[in-house]
Image (cartoon, rainbow, N blue to C red):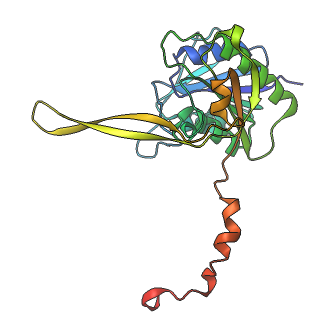
Amino acid sequence: MSKPLILICNDDGITAPGIRALIQAVRDLGDCVVVAPDRPQSGMGHAITIGHPLRVQAQHGLFGDLPAYQTSGTPVDCVKLAVDQILHRKPDLLLSGINHGSNASINVIYSGTMSAAVEGGIEGIPSVGFSLCDYALEADFGLSADVARTVAKAVLERGLMPGTLLNVNIPKIDPSQFRGLRVSRQAAAKWKENFEERHDPHGKAYYWMTGEFELLEQAEDTDEWALRNGYASVVPVQFDLTAHRALLSLQGWGMQDWNIENGI
């Protein structure tokens, strides 16, 4: 039997240190292929390119003998191109990351790293996104790589439930203080944005976004608690956005009996 086919992507760009650490951690687990953006694409969410052509360029020797391709598109574009054009069979596993910075709690909504993993899940590929809670260029990805390898091996062996994927975040911590993996739920949190108004040399206003992260709960079963207490958080994520708990309540509104205004 052939080895598992592992698709590796990210949102920080194909030359980012995080993706190199991920590749080194898992390259012996299967036949790895890298498809990643040609430049940083952080905060792109699930954006796709529809207004101009996408370009793909092979990157020979970038990761030794590993097949690698850079694209002009978003992280989701990378997954779509890999599945439809580059690979000759469906991947057995998709790994995205290792991202510079947290994608825990509400950050999962904005993350290009996690959107690549979500796209893998939509395609029926067991998928995992990895993020290190450290934004420094010189961040140490050693612990994150160990976590990524552990989780990747487990998913290859056990699989994931259909319609789900994993969001794994690793704390910025000395490895000696690391307490292990902790299955968690997404914490309630939000960003409070501020837009600083500035003016260009012609006097026209422009805005620079800043913001503060607001954690709205301290429950011990959340990803943010896990990260603040020395654990790597492992959150199962789904892409069915239906609010199932609200279905009965909304059905109780009796919409089918409503008379539309203006006689429409």
User: In front here: 230 or 256?
Assistant: 230
Residue 159 figure quarter? top right
**Residue in view at x 60 percent, y 41 percent:** 217
Q: Residue 148 at what x, y percent from top left?
A: 71, 21
Is any part of residue 66 visible from this angle? no
Is any part of residue 246 visible from this angle? yes
Judge from the rendering whether residue 220 lies leftward or rightward of residue 201; answer left or right: right
User: In front here: 37 or 225?
Assistant: 225
**Residue in view at x 55 percent, y 16 percent:** 59
Q: Residue furthest left?
A: 202
**Residue in view at x 72 percent, y 36 percent:** 184
Judge from the rendering whether residue 138 lies leftward or rightward of residue 197; answer left or right: right
Q: Residue furthest front?
A: 218
Q: Residue 172 at what x, y percent from top left?
A: 59, 17
Q: Quadrant of the N terminus?
A: top right
Q: Residue 11 at what x, y percent from top left?
A: 53, 28
Q: Residue 3 at what x, y percent from top left?
A: 83, 22
Q: Residue furthest bottom?
A: 263
Q: Is residue 28 above or below residue 42?
A: above
Judge from the rendering whether residue 106 lies leftward or rightward of residue 94; answer left or right: left
User: In front here: 205 or 264?
Assistant: 205
Judge from the rendering whether residue 201 lies leftward or rightward of residue 182; answer left or right: left
